[in-house]
């Protein structure tokens, strides 16, 4: 064994000159690159066609916020949030991971549990612990406005001091934790604005947010309702996840990794002084997530990421609403002539809207990539591969939760209106899902709680 292999690796602050030289050595020497678990890992060899983008991503930042923290906060403890948190803690020398709970009941349940996350893959369950946990403290707020405690608990307020629903109220703004620099958002698209409002005081222009969600148009809504001022707005990243993850029967903090997939990650550049810049925190999140083997994450250029988003949007705009309306698993939409006609009508509208988008006009092969025929082949392949899975929208409808229909089919309708295209089929899907939501909500509200009857008692 050479002396170099036994030399201890010194972990230096991320963003420091010595750390940057170390990363350069790791990229040139394979034997040191294998030890990158003790330091920030180097990125893989980029595609030549995207060399400029990858050079910009991996270039050292010398502006404010160059020294960043390793701790990663995760907002959202659903199936995807649990998978991301569990995978990060499974790394050698893992980064500190903190779970942010925007519901008081979830936070109290975590404190009463073993404080670990279990992921089951192919029948094998692995548990990881060592997570931090914080409530999303925002003071007393409603509709994005700060209120006093008296105003919040007024007669017209949705919470009552003498009601059990008080446990779902926000936490008071006391002992506000440290600022958040690295944030991964995995909550449902419809809940993103409210969730970010809870931690808005902890985010700054040096923070970076990675959105791992279904649908499109989320960032535009966040900019409008949460970070209206571009000068103080955090840096954004987008991720497209194809892993199949579902809730587990072992508890709230357990999930089943049903299907292996990938994550495509892209950085949204920030324009300063007429130049596009990537923050140090964004590159740290990208490199950290990309070195997790289970997640199989790869960086993508913004243009390629947008096209991948549109492909996934087209697939979700077909599978999610149809399975939610017929109350069946994904494979049920295959080999059914009536549903096939509906699928083709939906895809014809989606293809027409995508091909009319001005941001795709100068790109090659767009007409073939987003043709109705190819989109139908993608939908069929995904429905066949995930035939036994329950779509996220069907799960939300069954549980009485708000769906992401406004950010899936609703996005197609919105872009169609901007381009002068009327999307009858997608508009109908949006209204049908909303109507079914209201029906389910009404049925659940009319349910009568039944008292438990002891075995010795008889019901007359």
Image (cartoon, rainbow, N blue to C red):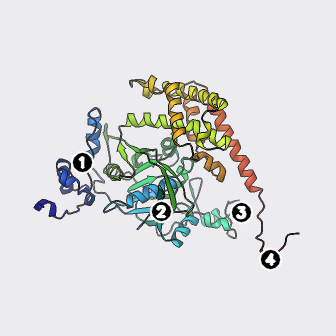
Helix or strand or loop: what does disc 4 sit on? loop
Q: Which label's residue is closer to the chain start, 1 or 4?
A: 1
User: Is residue 333 found left or right of 236 in the rendered image?
Assistant: right
Which residue lies under the disc numbered 2? 118
> Callout 2: helix, strand or loop?
strand
Closer to viewer: mark 3 or mark 1: 1
The answer to whether the residue labelled 3 contacts the one labelled 1, judged by CB atoms less than 8 Å apart, is: no
**Left or right of residue 77, residue 49 in this image:** left
Residue for point 71% across, 51% down: 441
Residue 158, relative to residue 325: is it above or below? below
Disc 1 element: loop
Asked whether the residues under the numbered discs 3 and 2 touch, taking CB atoms below 8 Å apart as contact, a structural biologist would say no
Few, some or many residues within 10 Å of mark 4 (<14, 14–19, 20+): few
Kindly tell me whether residue 314 is visible in this rendering. Answer: no
Which of pointers 4 and 2 indicates the residue nearer the eye? 4
Picture layout, residue 133 above or below residue 444: below
Q: Residue furthest right?
A: 460
**Residue that numbered label 3 is attached to:** 155
Q: CA distance from mark 4 to mark 3?
A: 43 Å
N-terminal of the pair, mark 4 or mark 2, is 2
Tell me the element at label 3: loop
Q: Which mark is residue 456?
A: 4
Disc 2 or 1, which lies upstream in sequence? 1
Badge number at residue 60: 1
Q: Residue 202: horizontal and vertical position, in percent?
A: 43, 59
Badge 2: residue crowd in 10 Å (few <14, some 14–19, many ≥20):
many
User: Are there few (<14), some (14-19), or many (20+) residues within 10 Å of tag 1?
Assistant: some
């Amino acid at each position: 064994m050479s002396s170099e292999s036994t030399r201890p690796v010194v972990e230096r602050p991320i963003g420091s000159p010595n750390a940057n030289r170390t990363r350069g050595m790791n990229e040139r020497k394979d034997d040191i690159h294998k030890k990158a678990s003790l330091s920030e890992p180097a990125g893989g060899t980029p595609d030549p066609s995207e060399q400029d983008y990858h050079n910009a991503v991996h270039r050292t930042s010398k502006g404010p916020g160059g020294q960043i923290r390793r701790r990663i906060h995760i907002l959202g403890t659903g199936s995807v949030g649990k998978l991301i948190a569990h995978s990060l803690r499974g790394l050698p020398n893992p980064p500190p991971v903190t779970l942010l709970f925007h519901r008081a009941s979830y936070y109290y349940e975590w404190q009463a549990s073993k404080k670990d996350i279990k992921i089951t893959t192919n029948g094998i369950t692995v548990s990881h612990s060592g997570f931090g946990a914080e409530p999303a403290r925002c003071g007393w707020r409603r509709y994005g406005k700060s209120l006093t405690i008296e105003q919040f608990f007024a007669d017209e307020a949705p919470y009552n001091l003498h009601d059990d629903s008080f446990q779902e109220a926000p936490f008071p703004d006391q002992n506000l934790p440290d600022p958040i620099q690295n944030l991964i958002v995995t909550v449902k698209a419809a809940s993103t604005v409210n969730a970010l409002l809870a931690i808005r005081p902890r985010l700054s222009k040096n923070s970076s947010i990675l959105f791992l969600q279904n649908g499109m148009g989320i960032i535009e809504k966040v900019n409008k309702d949460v970070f209206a001022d571009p000068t103080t707005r955090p840096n954004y990243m987008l991720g497209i996840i194809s892993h199949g993850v579902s809730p587990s029967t072992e508890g709230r903090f357990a999930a089943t990794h049903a299907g292996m997939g990938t994550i495509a990650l892209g950085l949204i550049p920030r324009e300063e002084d007429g130049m596009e810049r990537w923050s140090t925190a964004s590159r740290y999140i990208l490199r950290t997530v990309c070195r997790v083997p289970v997640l199989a994450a790869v960086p993508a250029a913004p243009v390629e990421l947008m096209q991948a988003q549109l492909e996934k949007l087209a697939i979700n705009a077909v599978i999610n609403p149809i399975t939610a309306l017929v109350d069946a698993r994904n494979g049920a939409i295959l080999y059914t002539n009536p549903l096939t006609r509906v699928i083709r009508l939906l895809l014809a509208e989606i293809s027409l809207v995508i091909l009319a988008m001005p941001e795709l006009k100068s790109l090659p092969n767009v007409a073939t990539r987003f043709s109705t025929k190819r989109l139908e082949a993608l939908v069929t392949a995904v429905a066949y591969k995930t035939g036994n899975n329950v779509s996220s929208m069907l799960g939300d409808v069954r549980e009485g939760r708000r769906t992401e229909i406004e950010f899936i089919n609703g996005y197609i309708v919105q872009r169609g209106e901007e381009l002068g295209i009327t999307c009858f089929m997608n508009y109908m899907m949006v209204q049908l899902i909303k109507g079914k939501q209201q029906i389910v909500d009404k049925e659940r509200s009319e349910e009568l709680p039944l008292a438990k009857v002891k075995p010795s008692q008889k019901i007359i």
